[in-house]
Each structure stands twice: as C-alpha cells, then as structure tokens.
C-alpha cells in the first residue's frame, strides 16, 4: 500500500506536522488550484473566516491529541492532574502534604493523678504553633513530671481549623470536598470527621478507611482522597458498604494548616511554653459527646500549669507525592490490595499508611534475617550469642512467637531524628508505635506470617583516610579554588558543607542504600570556583573523597571507602558530628 494519499500527495503521518497557519495555507492553495472559489484569498471574507475556524479548530484538536496520547498512559504521564485521575481507577490515593513534627516532654505542678490532654491542644512558640492530634493520657506524679510515652505522642506543626459544616442530603456514596485556597497546606494525616446525627443530635467520630467496600453496612467510615486539584474529597457509604449519611446529618471537619518550612523549630524552642486548649463552641460539644466515662480532661486552669520542652529539632515537612512517586507506589498498592503476602506487600503497606511516623522500611524473611543480620552479629561483631544483643533481644521479647520459621522482620526508621550525643544515633520506633503498626498489619496479613520488629543498625559516616595502624581519623576536606573565578572563601566552605549535609540528610537516606561517592564528588566540583578536591590527615592525602564507615556501638565494624559502596539491608547511614564538619572544610588557592 502506498504511503501517499493519491488525491493530496501528502505523507500518511503529515497531519502531525500541521498547525493552524500551515493548514489554512494548504486549504487556500487547494481552492486556488481548483479555480472554483475566489473569496478565500481575501482576508475578512466569509469563506476566509470559515477556513480560519476549521484551521484553528484542527490546531486545538491536534494539541489535545498530542497531550492525551501520552498523558492517558500510566507509564508516560508527567502531569499530576492526569496521573491522579489514572490511579483513581486503582483505588490509590496520593499522599498529600505532611507538616513538621516534634517530640516533646512535659512538666507540671498540678495535683497527682490521671489526666488527659484533649486533642487539638497547642503550644505557641513565638507565633509557631504545634498541636496535639489525639487525646494524650498521662500520670502526674510528685506534682512534677508527666509520665507518658513521649515517642508515641508527638506534636504537629500548625493549628487546627474548623471547616464550614456540611449538611447531608442523604444520598448513597455522598461526597464532601474540602475546598480551600491552593496556598493552604493541609496536613495529610490530621483530618478528622465528626457527624451530628439528625435524629439524636449527638456527635460521633467517623473513621477513615482505605476502601468502603471492605466495610460492613453499619460502619461509621469514610474514604479520603486527594484529588487532581490538590483538594481532599470525603466519600461516605450507602448502608451496604459503610453507613450512609442521613438527610439533615451535619458533617464537621477539622484539619491542621501547616506553616511549611517556616514552622521548623530548633532544640529548646518549646521550653517553658504553656499548653493551651483548643476551644470553640462546636468543638466543646463534640468533645462532650465523644468523651469516654473514665476520661479526665484537663481544665483551662490546669493546662496553664503545664510547660513543654523539646530536646531535638522538629522534622522537615514533606511535600505532596510527586508523579514519579505515584508511578512507583501505585502498582505495589494495587498488587497487594490490602492483603499482605510478600515482603514487598508489607513494605508498600507500611510506607503508604504510616508515612507520617516513618522515613523508610525494609522487610525480609527469616532466611535473609539469619544469613545477613545474625551473620553480621556473629561473624563481623563476634558476639557470643547474637540473639542476646540488646536491641535484638528487646524486639524478640515483645513481638516474636515461639516459632521463628514463619517470621518476617521489619526494619523501620522513624521520621524523627534523635541523637543522644554526637557519636550515636538512637532514634528507634517506640514500643507503642511498633504495636500500632503491628495492629494495622494484623487484619491484612496472611495467616501464619508473624511480623517481628528489628531496630536498624545506624552506621556513622565521616571524612577519613586509611592509616597504617587502621585507626579512624577525622580528616580534613581540602578545596582547591580556581583563581580565575572570584568567590568568598567562607561562602565556598558553606556550599561544600551543604552538599554533604544534603546528601546524608535523614529524610534523604535509606536502609541498605548505595552511597554514591562519585555523585557527591561531582556535586562539589560543579560548585562555581571549585578546581579540585582532596581528603587529608597529616601527611596522608587521598585525591577526591574518602569516608570512614563504622558502627559506633560496636566499633570493630569499621571500613574506609573512596569509591561507591553499598550497605546491608539493615544498616542506615548518618553523618557523624555535623557540628564540626564546616570547620574541617579548608579552601586553598591553586
């Protein structure tokens, strides 16, 4: 078959090369050659106007064809709006904005006893507000210290906001959209829904579910989804899959509005700040209706006697899930369908449902655990009994059953970074957080699989060079400056330091990752004014970058690398002693 159209003498795919102007010219030329019509050559004539309409309509249709030919495909879509709509077919809900969080402690001089800090209580630190997301029970003893699980209950940056009430019309699968300005950053995990029954006049809290089709007919549940316009949609049931809203029911929605990066605080920012209670007329009624009989809420007077403190910096906020992140996570979610069978299923489920408290997770079976982690403890660290190592023993006591062949092992790195000193990374999930994740897994995992939490091994990384006695050295990083490019020495030093800090940032590092020394080196060379780089200690000099990697708890695990290297699945890297890092970056002239 010929590749030409006989009548028009055009390639079969030439339509893709036309725009409005070229198509208009083609039509005019065709009419001129036929010598039937003449008005086409006169701009403003009726025929010329019709030709323009046809040509520009074709141009619009061609644009639509070019966009949808790729944007309709999951593997090719690059526009968030299109990707969001595609994964809606998979029942996948993209993750929204996540605000900064902070671990806190409390002190008080109220009378000893059991109390509860009401949800949405907040502390104001010079205009930066952090709020509680749930009721926090505590035991005040000796009129001083609040005893609570400080690792389970954390503060979320921002203050809770009441969305205008929605009155239900009583239809099946009724939808409510939280319509706010695009510059309002709603924390993805802070949305709470309360419904006031038109029959009883009482409020009840409704729970969020992954899928209404998994809920019984009397379940007070709703689906939450971030749509293609970055607005949240709430979908209620139909009395078959989840309870249906009745006509006249009032839906009240609360959520945290984040201050983005300006809401990050440093250590001690909350020290000696008083706790304030969230009070509105509507919320006071809600709190009264949902209060459990044994709950003893703090009063306004008692709350003023509670002061807070924070020893560590708050975490960085997390942006909306990107197109590439959706492309990576959605297939895994669709594959497991909330039924956890493989290790990939467990990883995907935990990352999707607990991303507000974790930064990374690695899941392995019993064989991998024995052949890797236990082998590391036995052979590399020479422990006489690996199962009695403190972190391993603590987790096995709390989570392992008598049988081990059906265990899977979960290595989870919390989102918040905690250091008790410059030498050791000590941030582990609390027992309550682990138990919360385990309870979530329990209803979805296959029968016979037993999840056991194992704390990651934190590996310190620092600039260092190999010495004859094989000791760890705190080496300097020398930057050779290009004399033809004027740069401030101090600024150059800070930019070099920032490359290291950014690469090994807690939220950027992963369990078992490959440390790309070449990339770090190239990023430094790409800084304007940098001619070359070398690492040195005393008379020992190594061209480029040289790092020491070691276990700060068992320092027999120690290595030097000046090229790319990979960590085991249970190891997580952190940059050692960052407070003194900038002082060890030395800028030299050529």
Image (spheres, grey):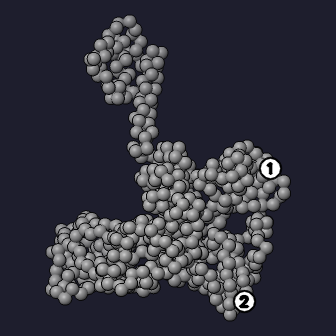
Task: State which quadrant residue 161 falls in.
Answer: bottom right
Residue 447 visible from this viewpoint: yes
Residue highlighted by disc 2: 112
Q: Position of residue 16 (x, y in %)?
A: 35, 29
Q: Is residue 543 left or right of residue 330?
A: left
Q: Position of residue 563 (x, y in %)?
A: 22, 70
Q: Position of residue 72 (x, y in %)?
A: 45, 39
Q: Is residue 491 left or right of residue 65?
A: left
Q: Name the residue located 43 percent from the left edge and 44 percent from the top edge.
A: 74
Q: Return the disc, 1 or 2, that comes first in the chain's sequence.
A: 2
Tell me the element at label 1. loop
Relative to 354, is 215 above or below? above
Disc on res. 248: 1
Q: Nearer the viewer, residue 144 or 42?
A: 144
Q: Quadrant of the N terminus?
A: top left
Tell me the element at label 2. loop
Q: Position of residue 243 (x, y in %)?
A: 72, 51
């Amino acid at each position: 078959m010929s590749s030409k159209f006989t009548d028009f003498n055009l390639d079969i795919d030439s339509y893709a090369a036309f725009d409005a102007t070229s198509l208009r010219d083609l039509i005019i030329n065709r009419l001129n050659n036929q010598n039937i019509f003449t008005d086409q050559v006169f701009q403003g004539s009726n025929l010329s106007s019709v030709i323009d309409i046809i040509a520009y309509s074709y141009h619009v249709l061609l644009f639509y064809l070019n966009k949808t030919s790729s944007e309709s495909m999951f593997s090719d879509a690059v526009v968030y709006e299109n990707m969001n709509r595609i994964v809606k077919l998979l029942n996948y809900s993209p993750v929204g904005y996540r605000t900064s969080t902070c671990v806190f402690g409390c002190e008080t001089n109220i009378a000893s006893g059991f109390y509860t800090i009401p949800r949405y209580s907040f502390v104001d630190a010079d205009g930066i507000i952090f709020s509680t997301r749930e009721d926090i029970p505590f035991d005040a003893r000796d009129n001083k210290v609040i005893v609570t699980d400080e690792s389970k209950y954390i503060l979320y940056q921002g203050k809770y906001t009441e969305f205008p009430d929605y009155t239900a019309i009583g239809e099946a699968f009724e939808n409510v959209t939280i319509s706010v300005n695009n510059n309002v950053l709603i924390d993805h995990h802070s949305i709470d829904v309360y419904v006031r029954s038109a029959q009883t006049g009482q409020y009840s809290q409704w729970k969020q579910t992954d899928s209404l089709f998994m809920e019984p007919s009397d379940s007070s549940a709703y689906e939450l989804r971030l749509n293609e316009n970055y607005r949240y949609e709430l979908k209620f049931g139909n009395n078959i899959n989840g309870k249906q809203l009745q006509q006249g029911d009032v839906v009240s929605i609360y959520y945290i509005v984040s201050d983005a990066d300006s809401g990050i605080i440093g250590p001690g920012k909350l020290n000696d700040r008083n706790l304030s209670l969230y009070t509105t007329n509507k919320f006071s009624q809600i709190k009264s209706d949902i209060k459990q009989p044994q709950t003893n809420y703090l009063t306004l007077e008692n709350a003023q006697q509670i002061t807070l403190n924070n020893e560590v910096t708050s975490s960085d906020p997390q942006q909306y899930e990107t197109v590439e992140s959706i492309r990576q996570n959605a297939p895994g979610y669709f594959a497991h369908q909330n039924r956890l069978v493989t290790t990939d299923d467990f990883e995907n489920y935990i990352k999707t449902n607990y991303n507000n408290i974790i930064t990374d997770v690695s899941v392995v079976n019993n064989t991998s655990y024995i052949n890797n982690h236990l082998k590391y403890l036995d052979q590399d660290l020479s422990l006489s009994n690996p199962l009695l190592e403190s972190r391993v023993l603590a987790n096995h006591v709390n989570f392992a059953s008598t049988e081990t062949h059906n265990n899977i092992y979960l290595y989870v790195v919390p989102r918040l970074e905690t250091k008790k000193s410059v030498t050791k990374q000590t941030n582990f999930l609390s027992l309550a957080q682990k138990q919360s994740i385990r309870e979530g897994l329990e209803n979805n995992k296959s029968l016979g699989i037993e999840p056991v939490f194992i704390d990651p091994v934190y590996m310190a990384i620092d600039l260092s060079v190999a010495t004859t006695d094989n000791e760890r050295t705190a080496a300097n990083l020398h930057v050779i400056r290009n004399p033809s490019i004027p740069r401030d020495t101090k600024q150059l030093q800070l930019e070099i330091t920032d490359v290291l800090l950014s690469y090994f940032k807690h939220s950027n590092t992963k369990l078992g990752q490959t440390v790309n020394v070449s990339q770090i080196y190239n990023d430094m060379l790409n800084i304007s004014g940098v001619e070359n780089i070398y690492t040195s200690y005393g008379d020992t000099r190594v061209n480029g970058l040289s790092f020491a990697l070691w276990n700060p708890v068992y320092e027999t695990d120690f290595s030097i690398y000046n090229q790319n290297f990979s960590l085991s699945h249970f190891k997580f890297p952190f940059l050692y002693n960052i407070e003194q890092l900038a002082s060890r970056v030395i800028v030299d002239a050529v």
